Image (tube, rainbow, N blue to C red):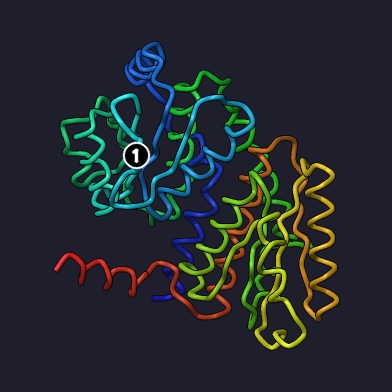
Amino acid sequence: MVTDDITNMRNAVMDFPNLLTKLQLDKEALDIVENLRDKRLVRIAILGMGGSAIAGNYVQALLLDSSRQEVIVNQDYSLPAYIDDEWIAIAISYSGNTAETLAAYDEAARRGCQLLAVTSGGKLLSEDRSLMKIRIPSGFQPRAAFPLIFSVVLNLVECLVGVKPSKLMDIAGTLSERLTKWKTSSAAPKHMAQDLVGQIPVFIGARHLIPVAYRAKCQINENSKAMAFYSQIPEANHNELESFTTTNTGSIILPIFLRSSFEDEIIGKRMDLTSSLYEEEGYSPIQLRIKNTSRIEEMLLLTFYLDLVSLELAQIRGANPAIVERINRLKMTLSD
């Protein structure tokens, strides 16, 4: 059973490139988005939890350097007090039944926000208050549906803020090519998974790679049923740097630095110095780089690669990536 679930999840993850280009906004959706843009509603709140919210985190990070409009990601039952009827709220829930997202959606409606929804079904799909509901295919684990959700949300927000659409078709082609190369490479995902056995990885990113580090942590948690954490530079240099001491090396922490082709000099120096300090204390940091041509391609290549690593680690550990028993138990208890 576990083997079958690993195979099914692996097939879903390996379909990442195809899922990235599976959905396109139709003319009706584009007309609604253009109408909202003409109203000059330039503040966008993305409402979601878990894998759905991560898509928002990626979009927010990508637009930091290209858009003057405000984009926030809200991962809670409630909304910040400053959100009002001048905001667009995009509710994302793969199942359509995420309690926190539905509560935030209701609050956004009460405050007069312009409402959009992205879901595969559930209560969110049956709501009649949205200007637009984009239905995505069902049948995936929410975390495996990330490429579907991300592509839709990215296209929506890019249209809303008026920036040039990303060429996801080209990126999907690159992802497929790399998948073929990784299968026979010395840097194959299965080799990195072996490095993680018996270790607690800390994925460390900067700027647009911070959400990638977070996603990697979540995938190890959910797919591999293993502990993992994430961190970010430069913030980590002001606190957790002090915890990486010789006396703590028995804690089997493995720092994994996600390195970017777009690091500026100061971030590159901080990454290098932090890694060197960890080495001095007896740790064995990994520097993970993947050749790319743009920030979005870099984010998606690293995400795809680390998704595969999480499945290889699940197989090594004999973990079932399709079952999230404790999460479901908590949800059921809360609903009761």
Quadrant including the N terminus = bottom left
Q: Quadrant of residue 153?
A: top left
Q: Position of residue 3 (x, y in %)?
A: 46, 74
Q: Is residue 272 above or below residue 95?
A: below
Q: For numbered disc 1, what is the local secondary structure?
A: loop
Estimate how packed mark 1 is, as few (under 14), some (14 to 19) or many (20 or more) residues with alpha carbons within 10 Å.
Answer: some
- Looking at the image, which is closer to me, 248 or 261? 248
The reply, left or right, for residue 286 in relation to residue 153 is: right
Q: Is residue 72 above or below residue 270?
A: above
Q: Position of residue 75 (x, y in %)?
A: 38, 51
Which residue is depicted at the point 22% across and 42% down? Answer: 124
Q: Quadrant of residue 123?
A: top left
- Disc 1 marks a residue whose amino acid type is Ile
Q: Quadrant of residue 68?
A: top right
Q: Is residue 286 above or below residue 318?
A: above
- Looking at the image, which is closer to me, 166 or 161? 161
Quadrant including the C terminus = bottom left
Q: Position of residue 308 (x, y in %)?
A: 59, 60
Which residue is depicted at the point 75% across and 47% down? Answer: 260
Which residue is depicted at the point 53% across and 73% down? Answer: 314
Q: Position of residue 333 (x, y in %)?
A: 20, 72
Can you identify the residue that label 1 sits on? Answer: 136
Q: Is residue 195 above or below residue 206?
A: below
The reply, left or right, for residue 187 in relation to residue 219 is: right
- Looking at the image, which is closer to me, 298 or 77? 77
The reply, left or right, for residue 157 in relation to residue 308 is: left
- Looking at the image, which is closer to me, 148 or 104? 104
The reply, left or right, for residue 293 in relation to residue 305 is: right
